[in-house]
Image: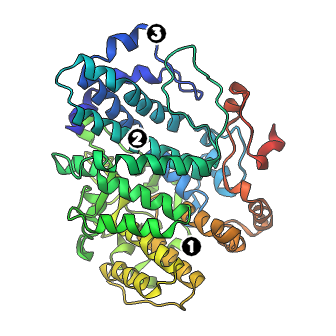
Amino acid sequence: MIKKVFFWVSIIFFFTACEDTLVILPRDGLVKNEYWKLKEDVEATLMGAYQKFAQMDYLLFFYGELRGDLLEQGGNLPNEWRDIMNGNIYPWNSLTAWTPFYSIINYCNSVLAYSPQVKESDPTFTQYKLDQYNAEAIFLRSLAYFYLVRIFKDVPYIIHPYDTDEQDFFPSKTEGELILNTIKLDLQQIIDKIPKEHSTNAETRGRATRGAVNALLADISLWTFHYEDCIKYVEDIEQNELYKLLPGGKWFNLFSEGNTLEGIFEFQFDGNLGQYNHMYNLTRPENNYFQVSSFGLEILLPEISNELIRGFGTVNPLNEFIWKYVGIKPDEYSRRSSAEQADCNWIVYRLADVLLMKAEALSQLGSYNEALIIVNQIRDRAFMGVVSAPQNPQAYEDMILMERAKELAYEGKRWFDLLRMGRRNNYERKTTLIEIVIEKVPATQKRVLASKLNDPNGWYLPINDQEMETNVNLVQNPYYQVYE
């Protein structure tokens, strides 16, 4: 069903007629009255939110990897991407535009606002379906806000659709911590109204489920250092028979097939339906946008780390490029055919990811033995031997972040993992984050980038200058106020 709805979801693109700023309006005043009549209208708008999020796969990759230590710059890298990687970040860089996230949020707010009136006009629209669609909208909206807070810190918090000229088009920022507390409560309230699974496997992995909600709750809890909560949400996922770690020999099926038992939430792509991802072209070596960093090669090349599965499946050691999104097998040379080049799903959450979240939370609570069991479980799947570390929070933090770097390389996780480490315990390990990040830049730039990263406000992006010009109530991130 999800792919069928995606096929005709373009009929509701009038919701994003004005996407160059935060303000998103319908084309005219008649659209709303003519549109919200049937449950199919609600479903189409909800599927529009899924599709818009899927179209952001390259942005999720950029925000999670460009500032980390697993990538190096290729010769054809566009200047704006290069600037982000070098720490030369300015409000006029198009990657500082948050509009795509607010487009998704507006889709979700529209579902939440108008689904009740559709129920009044469409007798086939049951309360069960209304609750489910609303719960899915809250999940997607919460995921969008979680990204926004991690990227920008404080952002406008909007829960009503922009559809009339009588609304406040100049919202001020809300503290990121307050937003995270709010969406965590929202997710807790919808967990029982969202399906455990959908009618097909693709829908179960590609639409919000209880497992996906628990994964997002675990991620938010770890980010806010509520470790007991993180553990609880991951354990709920572990008790769900829908999710299993793939055996080592099947690990690459995560990417070559998608929607495996390990997948919890994945944005879906199918070239036969005109749904194309961006990751093949971003990472194919002919384009020469990115190369695997020396650190990435060190931890992933099989001859160096013996990562027989994760290594061959993540990078091509012959040409030092990312293999996950280009190859069809973990063998260095079997590429995707032209018909399936852009079919690879973007995995938001999978079981190995949340298990390592749990391990991190356990180690921060001093439960080192339990954390170590999880780490070695993930390593065993990669045909690696057992590992250990001194029983203190920092040693376990380093070990677990290393395993996350190996297991989740180029899946949009690394920068956020480093930020979480740097923020923990009142920036206790700020220097460690700086040392990790500056390692990838030339020697002549290390001191400059270290100076920039010394202020934690510089860890977040600025508000785009177009947003600042449009909305008089916005206050620029303090680190970037010099550019106003």
Q: Residue at x 37, y 84 (%)?
A: 373
Question: Disc 2, disc 1: CB below 8 Å?
Answer: no
Q: Is residue 37 above or below residue 318?
A: above
Q: Nearer the viewer, residue 311 or 411?
A: 411
Q: Is residue 483 above or below residue 43?
A: below
Residue under label 1: 294
The image shows residue 475 at horizontal and vertical percentages of 74, 38
- Provide the secondary structure element on which disc 2 rests: helix
- Which quadrant would residue 442 be assigned to in this image? bottom right
Alpha carbon of mark 3 to alpha carbon of mark 2: how far?
26 Å
Alpha carbon of mark 1 to alpha carbon of mark 3: how far?
53 Å
Q: Amino acid at mark 2?
A: Ile
Colour theme:
rainbow
Residue under label 2: 138
Residue under label 3: 28
| On-image quarter of the C terminus | top right
Density class for disc 3 (Cα within 10 Å; few <14, some 14-19, many ≥20) is: few
